Amino acid sequence: MNGMMLGMLAETNIHSGAGRSEGFVDLPVAREAVTGYPVIAGSSLKGALRDAAREKNLDESIFGSEDRAGDILVSDARLLLLPVRSLTGSYKWVTCPHILERLCRDLKLCGLSDGFEVVSVKKGEAIWSGEHLFLEEREFKHVGGMDDRMKSVSSVLKKMILHPQTASRLERQLVIISDDDFRWFASYGLPVAARNQLDDNKKSRNLWYEESLAPDTLMYAMVFERRDNALNKVRSMFESNPYLQLGGNETVGMGWFAVKILEKKGEGK
């Protein structure tokens, strides 16, 4: 079964809701039940792809209908790099060994040849191109820099990013921390905005707090074809306009991803 991978770089804030409140956050993002990582459900992604095909007057039949299964299989969109504020210069793109290990498995599942050695990091430690590091208010011990292993990781991640200029920043902003530390940032480090509904007299009717993924968050998803030529139709959706709107609050400019397609050599263009 042929597959492709979609690299999805957030251009704006992304809100794919979980549908239930957690603590003071009324509308949190959806998360994986076991890991706690933010996730976008495959059903939501498939629906966004269908909407994009409809708007571009392309063939919608690959997505199926009430009485016929679709020609493609769409995975959840998984988190890969999380932008985190830093007192050490600009923000950092943060990931962890478990995220990278899972990416290696998914690349193999899609038939892509790229691979890299997954580094090991202890709690409180960080591997990145600089030295002293603060992420939010937390300090991390520098235990490694941009060696051959990190360059191998960076070369794979760059292929997920549509814009070459953006990808060129990756090596100096990439940080790998432990799985436990990363889960803390994925759980408590996302932007939370207060939103308000006003009546005709400009008085508050409904104040709520909404969590989202920040711009420059990098995610990825997998798409597999059940029938020949289905992936070609997915590819055609992004040839002239490589962007996808997904999630809530579209009318206030949220939910836009820049999409980069990764395929086996010899497929596509």
Image (cartoon, rainbow, N blue to C red):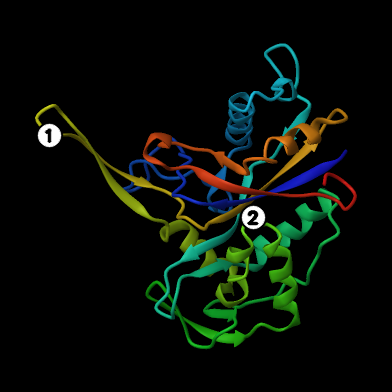
Does the residue at mark 2 contact the one at mark 1 (Cβ under 8 Å)?
Answer: no
- Considering depth in this image, is 173 or 260 the residue closer to the camera? 260
**Which residue is found at the position 59% from the left and 65% from the top?**
165
Disc 2 element: loop
**Residue 162, located in which quarter of the rendered image?**
bottom right
**Which residue is found at the position 70% from the left and 75% from the top?**
119
For marks 2 and 1, give the one nearer the viewer: 2
Provide residue 181's location: percent of width, then percent of height.
52, 69
Q: Which residue does the numbered mark 2 point to in the structure image?
A: 162
Provide residue 238's location: percent of width, then percent of height.
67, 40
Disc 1 element: loop
**Viewed as shown, does residue 137 lie left or right of 238?**
left
Q: Amino acid at mark 1?
A: Lys
- Considering depth in this image, is 141 or 148 the residue closer to the camera? 148
Q: Amino acid at mark 2?
A: Leu
**Viewed as shown, does residue 247 lie left or right of 223?**
left
Q: Which mark is residue 202?
A: 1
Real-space Cα separation, disc 2 to disc 1, in angstroms: 42 Å
Provide residue 124's location: percent of width, then percent of height.
52, 79
